[in-house]
Image (cartoon, rainbow, N blue to C red):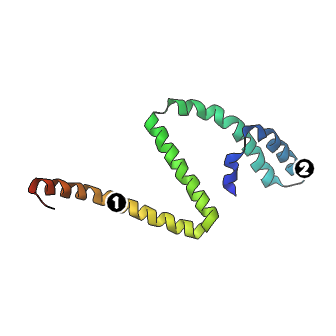
Amino acid sequence: MRNLILFVPPEFAVLLIAGAGVALIFGARALAGTLFALGLALVLLPVLLAPLFDALPTWLLIALLVFFGLGLLRALFNLLIGTRSTDHMVGILAADTVRATLTLPFRLLARILRSFFGGP
């Protein structure tokens, strides 16, 4: 549910700040603070982050896009199969990634040696 905030358009900031005021009137201080901070973030973050993203090199932008894409996939699987199952799945994938990263140099070396000495 917390990831639905990614789909809120910036024009919604005025309603969020007004909702924060209404929540404050009714005494929901935590909700009011959250709504107000979210409304300010929707207004200020694009102004602050746009020059930063414009200055980043392309390879770093692609890496950030992959990182955020994986985060969205995790949120989707969290919604579909549950939190504990998603945590288990991410743990297995992380272990496979580490295992593949550690064995890659040895596999490359074995392939080079096989090509030199005529192995199968």
Name which of mark 2 and mark 1 comes first in the sequence. 2
Q: Would residue 79 be found to the left or right of residue 9 on screen?
A: left
The quadrant holding residue 42 is top right
Residue 92 x, y percent position in the rendering: 45, 66
Query: Looking at this rendering, what residue extends furthest in the left direction?
Result: 117
Q: Which of marks 2 and 1 is in front?
A: 1
Which quarter of the figure is the N terminus placed in? bottom right
Label 1 secondary element = helix
Looking at the image, do the residues carrying marks 2 and 1 touch, with CB atoms under 8 Å apart?
no
Which quarter of the figure is the C terminus placed in? bottom left
* Residue at image mark 2: 25
User: Residue at position x 70%, y 49% from top?
Assistant: 5
Q: Which of 24 and 56 is in front in this view?
A: 56
Q: Residue 78: in sight, yes or no?
A: yes
Say which amino acid is labelled 1: Ala
Position above or below: 3 against 94 = above
Residue 31 x, y percent position in the rendering: 79, 53
Q: Residue 82: in sight, yes or no?
A: no
Q: Residues within 10 Å of mark 1 (few under 14, many from 20)?
A: few
Mark identifier at residue 100: 1
Residue 95 x, y percent position in the rendering: 41, 64
Position above or below: 116 against 86 = above
Q: Nearer the viewer, residue 63 or 20?
A: 63
